[in-house]
Image (cartoon, rainbow, N blue to C red):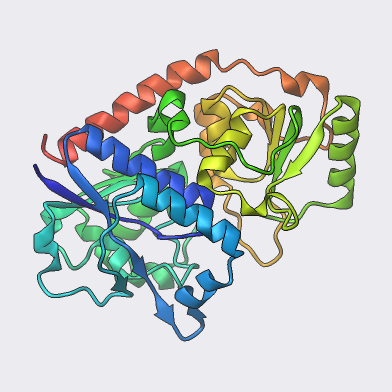
């Protein structure tokens, strides 16, 4: 059995990261590979990821570690920055890079030459729905992406990513694929789902915002919740649901009355579980626009009407995913076609 090493951002505090990592693993396992994730961290002067991880609320980190231990196969050896042991590549037949924002140079604690599997022969390097996270990269930064030219088969997650590959390398062969989390059925996701111990409500609006939420938006959310007899569950409320892990995150979306979010993966799981959602533009001071992944998602699945437009209405509770699911089946076939050719099956 051939062996694949997954190269991705290894984060013990981000739902989308852990869930996409699991999805990549399961897709590759379904194709007949022995798969494990290569744990790598960067320790740089401005940012020590190992120290940052220790600051995570212990109960929350415990849930992430439990998810890893229960569902993931992870290499015991931790790769620090670009310090890859000599002949490390001989342990694997292929290295699959992605997904998540593996190629976002604005995350120096996560971005390095390791992100391109530069240590391995070209024929072993495959990018599966890799993401830049941002729409534009200045030309004076292109040199950081030199190794991108030698990734043998490239697929990206966003339309903007395909354009960036062409701008940086001149290559026109980057295929745009769905996020790996969309490759698994809702039934498969339910096998790793867990009900949060702190959940007491039977009817709730799930609120998950990585950016800021204005007083006006909060007032609108509270008004709609009251009109519909809903509790509001805020995953980032440190007095309550902040200890939610990846498995509990899935449960909260599956059983929600409505999902309100600025998070890409909250949208993805809402679609998979046939839940109504509204996506808000992310309001985060000092951060560049990272909406390209959401733009691609909504455009591809004909869900532009899922954007929040200053008001939440009863009609927002009704969503017809019929066409979206037809598109999803076609997109899943595209992924299998890409991986079959890239991995020489």
Q: Which of the 4 quarters of the picture holds residue 82?
A: bottom left
Residue found 50% across the figure and 68% down from its top: 106
212, 243: nearer the viewer: 243
Split into 4 quadrants, where in the image is the C terminus? Answer: top left
Count of number-bearing discs: 0
Residue found 52% across the figure and 53% down from its top: 63
Residue found 56% across the figure and 17% down from its top: 321
In the rendered view, tell whether residue 171 sits above or below residue 268: below
In the rendered view, tell whether residue 13 sits above or below residue 80: above
Residue 14 percent coordinates (x, y): 53, 54
Apparent side of residue 219 relative to residue 317 in the rendered image (left or right)? right
- Residue reaching furthest bottom? 45
Split into 4 quadrants, where in the image is the N terminus? Answer: top left
Q: Which of the 4 quarters of the picture holds residue 253?
A: top right
Apparent side of residue 268 relative to residue 222 in the rendered image (left or right)? left
In the rendered view, tell whether residue 303 sits above or below residue 124: above
274, 292: nearer the viewer: 274
25, 153: nearer the viewer: 25
């Amino acid at each position: 059995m051939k062996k694949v090493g997954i190269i991705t951002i290894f984060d013990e505090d981000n739902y989308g990261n852990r869930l996409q990592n699991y999805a990549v693993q399961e897709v590759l396992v379904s194709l007949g590979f022995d798969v494990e994730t290569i744990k790598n961290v960067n320790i740089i002067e401005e940012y020590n990821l190992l120290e940052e991880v220790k600051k995570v609320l212990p109960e929350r980190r415990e849930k992430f570690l439990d998810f890893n231990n229960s569902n993931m196969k992870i290499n015991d050896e931790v790769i620090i920055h670009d310090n890859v042991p000599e002949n490390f590549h001989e342990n694997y037949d292929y290295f699959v890079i992605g997904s998540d924002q593996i190629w976002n140079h604005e995350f120096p604690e996560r971005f390095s030459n390791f992100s391109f599997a530069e240590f391995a022969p070209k024929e072993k390097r495959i990018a599966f729905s890799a993401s830049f996270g941002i729409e534009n990269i200045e030309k004076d930064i292109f040199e950081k992406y030199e190794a991108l030219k030698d990734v043998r088969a490239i697929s990206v997650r966003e339309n903007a990513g395909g354009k960036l590959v062409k701008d940086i390398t001149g290559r026109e062969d980057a295929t745009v694929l769905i996020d790996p989390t969309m490759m698994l059925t809702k039934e498969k996701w339910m096998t790793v789902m867990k009900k949060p111990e702190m959940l007491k409500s039977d009817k709730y609006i799930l609120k998950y915002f990585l950016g800021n939420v204005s007083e006006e938006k909060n007032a609108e959310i509270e008004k709609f919740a009251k009109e519909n007899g809903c509790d509001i569950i805020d995953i980032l409320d440190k007095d309550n649901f902040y200890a939610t892990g990846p498995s509990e995150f899935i449960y909260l979306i599956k059983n929600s009355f409505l999902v309100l979010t600025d998070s890409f993966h909250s949208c993805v799981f809402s679609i998979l579980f046939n839940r109504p959602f509204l996506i808000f533009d992310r309001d985060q001071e000092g951060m560049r626009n990272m909406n390209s992944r959401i733009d691609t998602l909504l455009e591809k699945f004909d869900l532009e009407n899922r954007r929040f437009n200053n008001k939440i209405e009863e009609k927002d509770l009704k969503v017809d995913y019929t066409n979206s699911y037809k598109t999803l089946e076609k997109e899943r076939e595209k992924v299998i076609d890409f991986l079959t050719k890239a991995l020489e099956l």
